[in-house]
Image: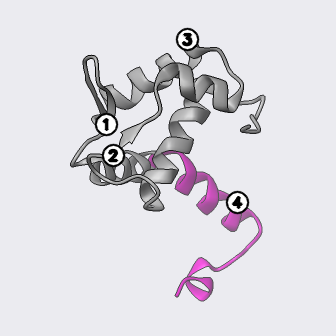
């Protein structure tokens, strides 16, 4: 069972978890992932929530649906995930990190290798 954060929609957390598994090498291009029903039962959520996660991942080009066969990791999944996550980091996380460092008078250059 996954543990969920109340501050983030569950379907996004599921998609993030799958992306993390891809980046860690647990899933590789061409691998079949669990069906919506299987994944829902495994992590204890409604299959409709998992379906929404799969739709999001398909829109991002991370997985593709082979009708009647299942969902598969795309050949470009890793690159697409990194591209998306870099964009999120640069637009959302890095500016707040820099601002906090400035407020705390931390010289980031001294801490970056």
Q: Nearer the viewer, mark 4 or mark 1?
A: 1
**Gap between marks 1 and 3, in whole Å?**
18 Å
**Mark 1 — residue?**
72
Q: Residue 48, labelled with which disc?
A: 3
**Gap between marks 3 and 4, in whole Å?**
39 Å
| Contact check, label 1 and label 3, Cβ < 8 Å | no
Task: Give the tally of numbered discs.
Answer: 4
38 drawn magenta: no
**Gap between marks 4 and 1, in whole Å?**
40 Å
| Contact check, label 2 and label 1, Cβ < 8 Å | yes
| Nearer to the camera, 18 or 60 | 18
| Nearer to the camera, 93 or 36 | 36
**Mark 4 — residue?**
100
Q: Nearer the viewer, mark 2 or mark 3?
A: 2
Q: Residue at x 40, y 53 (%)?
A: 86
N-terminal of the pair, mark 3 or mark 4, is 3
- Few, some or many residues within 10 Å of mark 4 (<14, 14–19, 20+): few
């Amino acid at each position: 069972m996954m543990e969920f954060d109340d501050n983030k929609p569950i379907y996004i957390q599921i998609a993030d978890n799958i992306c993390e598994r891809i980046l860690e090498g647990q899933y590789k291009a061409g691998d079949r992932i669990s069906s919506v029903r299987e994944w829902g039962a495994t992590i204890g959520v409604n299959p409709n929530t998992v379906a929404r996660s799969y739709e999001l991942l398909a829109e991002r080009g991370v997985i593709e649906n082979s009708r009647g066969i299942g969902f598969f990791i795309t050949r470009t999944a890793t690159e697409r995930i990194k591209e998306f996550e870099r964009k999120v980091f640069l637009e959302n996380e890095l500016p707040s990190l820099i601002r906090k460092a400035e407020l705390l008078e931390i010289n980031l250059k001294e801490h970056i290798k």
